[in-house]
Image: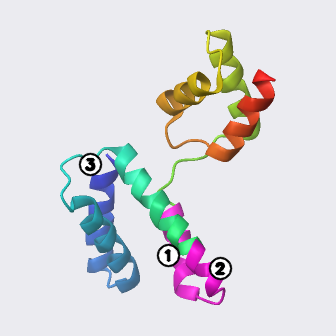
Amino acid sequence: MLFEQIKKDQLTARKNKESDKALWLSTLIGELQRGEKDFSDAKVLGLIKKNLENLRENLKHNPNSESAQNEIAFLEAYLPQQMSETEIQTAVQKLIAEGATNMKMVMTGLQTQYTGLYDGKLASKLVKDALG
């Protein structure tokens, strides 16, 4: 489970006196534990993506922030390998062949089968193109 891996990595970072990594992971763990009992990989990935989005937004305002750049690189290592455009097209075609007839059905199928593995904007464009 990803949450358990993050906890182990945080402990290792603390033992190795890697204060930045330990702080980033402690913050992530704290955000996950705030009122939650569900530490599924999907929840953890969702929070990591949200944090990455916020960090990238901060970088737009302060492009010289080395700390934000380092944190982005560090957190991205926890994300699964993203599907390529070709892989998304193949998945979309498969869902359409299985009977998905509209945008909502295809996108729901993608989310169910490939949670966190694809770029939503790209998938949306490819679905629109495939459905005509």
Q: Decide: is 14 above or below 105.
A: below
Q: Could you say whether the residue bearing mark 2 is in a helix, strand or loop?
A: helix
In space, the residues marked 2 and 3 are separated at their CA atoms by 31 Å
* Callout 1 secondary element: helix
Q: Nearer the viewer, residue 127 or 48?
A: 127
132 displayed left or right of 66 = right
Q: Earlier in the sequence, mark 2 or mark 3?
A: 3
Q: Position of residue 70 (x, y in %)?
A: 54, 79
Q: Which amino acid does label 1 sit on?
A: Glu
Per the rendering, the mark at residue 120 is: none
How far is mark 3 from mark 1, CA to CA?
A: 22 Å
Q: Residue 60 carries which label?
A: 2
Q: Quadrant of the C terminus?
A: top right
Q: Who's the residue at 39% across and 44% down the image?
A: 42
Q: Which mark is residue 71?
A: 1
Instruction: Magenta stretch: give its range.
Output: 57-76
How many C-alpha atoms fall within 10 Å of the one at disc 3: few (<14), some, or many (≥20)? some
Q: What element carries label 3?
A: loop
Task: Identify the mark at residue 39; answer none if there is no mark.
Answer: 3
List x then y, in percent, for residue 128: 75, 31
Does the magenta run of residues contain 74? yes
Name which residue lies at 69% across and 33% down. 88
Q: What residue type is labelled 2?
A: Lys
Frontmost residue, 43 versus 107 = 107
